[in-house]
Image (cartoon, helix red, strand yellow):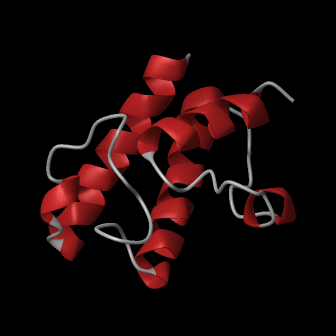
Amino acid sequence: MLEKIENIICETLVELNEELENENFGNPNSKTKLYGTNGMDSLALVSFITDLEERISDEFEKDIVLADEKAMSAKTSPFRSVESLTIYIKSLLEE
């Protein structure tokens, strides 16, 4: 399941990168930083989250909300890397 989620995140990043042209997202992996320094700005993050929620819903047939109170108030943001977001999405799918 983790590998499948990570692949969806990376595919979404590659598609988003066609608009962003951020060299860090051209060939993403589990260590790719998502937000902040060398990552997306807040507007790109919103677009990314929207696209990702839709893909996850299509693939796993379960609707999830990534930008909720739990994620935004977490001590360590799930949006810091592909790896942290993968783990966070897995936890949401298992609820």
Above or below for 72 versus 55: below
Above or below for 65 versus 31: below
Left or right, 95 with respect to 38, comes to right
Q: Quadrant of residue 41?
A: bottom left
Count of marks overlaid on the render:
0
Residue at x 75% of width, y 31% of height: 91
User: Which of 72 and 7 lies nearest the eye of the viewer?
Assistant: 72
Give residue 88's position: percent from left, percent from top: 67, 39
Quarter of the rendering occupied by the C terminus: top right
Left or right, 28 with respect to 85, comes to left
Residue at x 65% of width, y 38% of height: 89
Quarter of the rendering occupied by the N terminus: top right
Above or below for 43 versus 66: below
Give residue 44's position: percent from left, percent from top: 41, 76
Residue at x 25% of width, y 56% of height: 15
Residue at x 46% of width, y 83% of height: 43
Give residue 29's position: percent from left, percent from top: 28, 36
User: Which of 12 and 70 lies nearest the eye of the viewer?
Assistant: 70
User: Which of 29 and 95 lies nearest the eye of the viewer?
Assistant: 29
Give residue 35's position: percent from left, percent from top: 44, 66
Q: Quadrant of residue 63?
A: top right
User: Which of 42 and 62 lies nearest the eye of the viewer?
Assistant: 42
